[in-house]
Image (tube, rainbow, N blue to C red):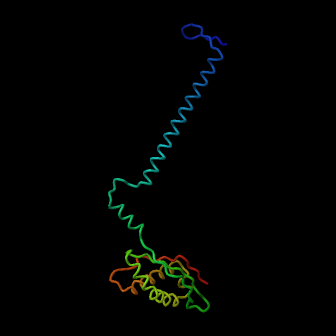
Amino acid sequence: MHVMASDKDELQVETPEDKDTKKKGGGNKKLLIIIIAAAVVLGAGGFAGYKLLAGKGDSGGKEEHKTEANAKSVMFALDPFVLNLSDYGRYLKVNVQFELSDMTLEEVVKDKSPQLRDAIITLVSSKSLSSISSPEGKFQLKDEILFRANQVMGAEKEVFKNLYFTEFVMQ
């Protein structure tokens, strides 16, 4: 037990029980502050996650339609190629996938796949290892294959938007 004097010259008696309740009260305040801070952090995280996943809600339907159309681009894969290069004893194993400009063209492209394969074989087998080993050489080869493939299709508009090498092994 402690005896304390206050400003008004009154004596106050402090018992051990009073100390325990003061300590518990301070601990409860800290716990309450921690809980509130955690709730604010979780709320902010939930809001940020909602905004990221939901996208921009005020942008209108046009942008959503564009991204939906881009997400649905159709890919057309040809069987893998193993080709001799113009260098003696050198070969290239390559997998090619085309991105079609229109989903409805997939059947037409399937029907023309032998002609596409022939055009690619003819083009790639005329290349040397040194001409396609650099990144610039690969980009040039992509452009040439894409140009030839669109020529084979004979359409007025481009059938293939892009070309991707999914495997490219030279030896």
In the image, is residue 119 above or below residue 55? below
Q: Quadrant of the C terminus?
A: bottom right
Of residues 93 and 6, the one drawn nearer to the viewer in this rendering:
93
At horizontal 58% and vertical 80% (from top left) the residue drawn is: 169
Instruction: Tally the marks.
Output: 0
Q: Position of residue 86 (x, y in %)?
A: 55, 91
In the image, is residue 151 above or below residue 14? below
In the image, is residue 68 above or below residue 117? above
Q: Position of residue 49 (x, y in %)?
A: 46, 50
User: Residue at the right extreme?
Assistant: 1
In the image, is residue 63 above or below residue 18? below
At horizontal 66% and vertical 17% (from top left) the residue drawn is: 16
Quadrant of res 82: bottom right
Q: Quadrant of the N terminus?
A: top right
Q: Position of residue 152 (x, y in %)?
A: 40, 87
At horizontal 32% and vertical 83% (from top left) the residue drawn is: 156
Q: Position of residue 41 (x, y in %)?
A: 50, 42
Q: Is residue 59 left or right of residue 146?
A: left
